[in-house]
Every structure is written in structure tokens, then in C-alpha cells.
Amino acid sequence: MIIEMNDVVCRFGVLAALDHLSLTVEKGEVVCIIGPSGSGKSTLLRCLNALEDIQEGSIEIEGLRLDRQHKDIHKIRLDVGMVFQQFNLFPHLNALDNVNLAQIVVRGRTRYEATVISKELLGKVGLTDKIDSYPSQLSGGQKQRVAIARALAMNPKVMLFDEATSALDPEMIGEVLEVMKQLAREGMTMLVVTHEIGFAREVAHRILFLENGRIVEEGPPQELLTSPKNQRTREFLAKVL
Amino acid sequence: MTWLVDQFTILGNVFYYLIQTVHWTILISVLAYLIALIFGLVFGILRLSLSRPVRWLASAYVNVIRGVPLLVLIFFIYFGLGKIVNLDRFVAGVLAVGICYGAYLAEIFRSGIQAIDYGQHEAAMSLGMTRWQTMRHIILPQSVRIVVPPAANEFIACLKDSSLVSIIGLRELTRAGREYSSQYFLDFQTWLVVGIIYLILTLTLTQLVKVIERRVAVHGYGVEKK
Ligand SMILES: Nc1ncnc2c1ncn2[C@@H]1O[C@H](COP(=O)(O)OP(=O)(O)OP(=O)(O)O)[C@@H](O)[C@H]1O
Ligand SMILES: [Mg+2]
């Protein structure tokens, strides 16, 4: 198992954004997470990357316990790559340096080593001709692909995608989803929060339906999407499909 | 006609006398400002520390210093602390102005750091950077663009306020003005010239700040488009 969440509670004040949630993810598995707004999808991913504190339960990534108070938390976090809805590229660095920086300061690679890796990854996401561009000179889809390359450059064992295509114009969604599909084919372990049901149907091994911080229903795409058992899942799917 | 010539001769003499002390004014303000930059950066960052006592200490510095007149601070350091440790008036004066402006710069730096979208911190941390690496490589380089214009303006204010150290006998421009006017009873002309010299300095600096402002704006990377 690569991810093990055990009875996790994450609270904001009195509200439990994750309410005794347990989840295991196997190596190479692609898990898509769907659910209404405020159901805790982002919180789930953020907890896996130690961007939020959990109040109860435990999270293990490859057997290492994720603890925000741990002084080496930034090292444990290295195994988890995250792609944000708003890209969060570093605007003062060009595409190449966006991908290079953490390799150099965190992984300790030389600039030369890092550049070789970055160029390869930027090529993989189809941006060979954009390595000198600053984020402000890139389209949304291009920015998100740089962000994916940036996360991959750290050799994560898991990739988390939080609505990676939600901030994009419709014509750019495809190019980003294509990169994600390719990653899935290569066997990357992925947790993907998405509203793209078509993507989930095609790529996911498993879909989770979240509501009120709980996994209401889960299963393989054809089952969960075509014959959901739970009433709430049916209502939600009726709205989005 | 001769009266006018006389007046100009007097003004010329005053100017010639005073201009020889202007380098002290510049030296005091530059040194004080360097101290202020260090204090400002350190305390500006400490105000955002995760540790509550550290944050408290940093904001105590900022609030206490900003709440006390600079003149009182100068007296306190020169006469007060001077009783305990032997402080040269130059050191005391520079230190007082530096500590005072450090508090103002700390506020400017803090708000410059906080102006950076929190997503930048999260992206950096998700890549495994420590808080310090995030600050150093991600946040501060972006804050510079925001911070430079107001921080440069503080130097102009610092230069003007350096006149206050004349009170403890530091012989800079204002002090020289006092000496000259009491020696020759030329108050009107002396203070007129002192004012003009300060004005020349500040106007020059204002232009310089404008150039710097344009530089960081153009040289900068565009802000991320949504
Ligand atoms: N930093 C925070 N402070 C307080 N409440 C928060 C915070 N972050 C999330 N919440 C709350 O926790 C709940 C779950 O939020 P979360 O962002 O995980 O939902 P989501 O499923 O990602 O929704 P969306 O589809 O709108 O992105 C929501 O009720 C939200 O208001
Ligand atoms: Mg969300």
C-alpha cells in the first residue's frame, strides 16, 4: 500500500471537513474523487500533502507517518507531488527554472543535472519551445503542464491533482487531461479530484464519492457511474452527467 | 542693488560653510538606513514566525518604536544607555535613527511578504522546501518588487529625520546651521539655506526612487495571469 489513511478527522472549528475517513490506495492505482462543493475533496488531498493538520487518526505514505509537527516533514512530503487548481507557478522564474528550483535546493541536484531532467519533462508535457517563457507569457493549459512537470521533477511516488482543469478555458482542458492520462498509463499512483466524469470513467481504477467529509460510496467507474447504490450518489451524478 | 549683492554674498557664504557638513548628514542617514534594513528584514520576517513568543517580541519592537518620538529614542540611547555603556554620540545617533527606521521597514517588509499569494507557499512546501527555502527562493524575490518603492521612500524620510541627531551634538547639517546662525546672527539666511540643501537632497532622491520604481516594474516578471 502506498497510502493509508486511518480514521482521519480534519476539523476547521466545529466543522469536520474530513469525518473519520479511511482510505487505502495501492501502488499504481488511479483514484478519482468526486463530490459536491464543500464535501472535503480538497481537504483530503491537502491532508495527504500535510498542508492541513489532522486532529484524529493517522496517515501513512509508504509506511512513513505523515505528521505536520515532525521537523523533517518537508522530506516526507517529497514523495507526494501536488498540482493545484490555480497552478501556483512561481511568477519570477521561467518555465525551466520553475521545474529546476526545487530539484536544486531540495534534491541537491546540480543545475546541469536538473536542467537535463527539466528539459526532458517539459518535452514530455509538450512544452519544449516554452522553456524560456515566464508564467505570465503562458496560457492556462501551458501553465498547468509546467506545474505537472515541476511536481514530477521531484520523482514523487504519488501525484495529487486538485481540480487541475477547473480554472482552464474549455479548449485547454484536453491538453492537460492528455498529460494526466499518459501519467496514468505509465503506472503513476494518482489521486485526482475532478469534475471531468469522462476522464474518471476512462482512467480511474476506482472512484470515490465524497460528501460531508465521508466516503459515501466507492467502486470501479462502470459500477459507480452506471449503477450507483447510494441515493446521494445518484442525485449527484444526475446533476453532473 | 548693493543690498541684493550683499544678500547673495551672505547666502553664498552660508551655503559654502554648510555644504561642508552635508557629508555627515549623508553618512549618518546611509548608515542608519543600513541598520534599518537589517532590523527591518529580520523583524519583518520574525513577525510572521510560527512561534508565538517570537512573533510577540517582533511586534513589540515595531509597536514600541513606532509609538515613541525619535527624539526621545535618541535621548534614551545617548543619555540613558550612555550611562551604562559608553556610547559615542555618532554611534548613538546612527543607532537611534536606524532602530527607529527598522521598525517602519519591518512593517513594509511584512506587508510585502504577506502580499504574496498563499498558494506560492503551498506550492513551494509541496515541493519539499522548508519554510526558510520558501522565503529565500520564492517569497522574498517576489516581495522585492512590491517593497522597493516604499522602502526607498523611507530613506528620504530617514535623511530628513537625521537632523534630529544634531541635538546630541553630532555636527551634521542642522547642527552646523545652529552654530552658524548663533555665531553670526543670520537666522533667516542660515535656515533658508539649510532648508534648500535638504530640499536638493530629497528632490534628487525622489527622482532616483522614481527611476528605481520604473526599473523594478519593467524588469520584473509579470504577475501571474489567471
Ligand atoms: N482553511 C479553512 N478554514 C475553514 N474552513 C475550511 C477551510 N478549508 C476548507 N474549509 C471547509 O471545509 C469544508 C471542505 O472544504 P474543501 O475545500 O475540502 O471542499 P471541496 O470538496 O474541495 O469543495 P470544492 O468542490 O468547492 O473545491 C468546506 O465546508 C469548507 O468551507
Ligand atoms: Mg476543492
Image (cartoon, rainbow, N blue to C red):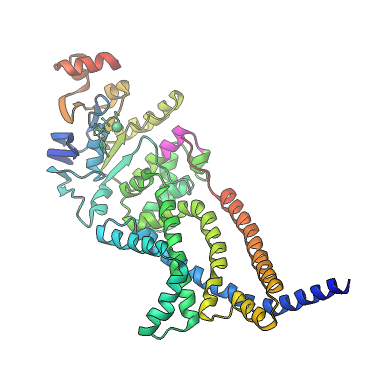
Quadrant housing the N terminus of chain B = bottom right
Q: Residue furthest right?
A: B1
Is residue A142 at all visible to an observer of this figure?
A: yes
Which residue is nearer to you in this view: B97 or B205?
Answer: B97
Q: In terms of image quadrants, where is residue A21?
A: top left
Q: Position of residue A16 (x, y in %)?
A: 17, 35
Where does the magenta region start and end? A138-146
Q: Is residue A145 above or below residue B68?
A: above
In the picture shown, does residue A114 fall above or below A37? below
Residue nearest the viewer, comparing B129 with B86? B86
Q: Residue at x 39, y 36 (%)?
A: A86
* Left or right placement of residue A121 versus residue B14 in this view: left
Query: Would residue B35 be seen by someone viewing this image from the given angle?
Result: no
The answer to whether residue A162 is left or right of residue A232 is: right
**Quadrant for ligand 1?**
top left
Relative image position of residue A217 (x, y in whole percent): 15, 23
Relative depth, front residue between B59 and A144: B59
Residue at position x 29%, y 17% in the image = A240
Q: Position of residue A101 (x, y in %)?
A: 41, 52
Q: Residue at x 18, y 39 (%)?
A: A10
Rendered location of residue B171, percent (x, y): 58, 80
Q: Is the magenta region chiefly helix, strand or loop? A: helix
Residue at the far bottom: name it: B86
Res B122 → quadrant: top left
| Viewer-closest of A69 and A63 | A69
Residue A40 sits inside the magenta stretch: no
Question: Is residue A140 inside the magenta stretch?
Answer: yes
Which residue is at 30% across, 21% downward? A197
How many numbered discs? 0
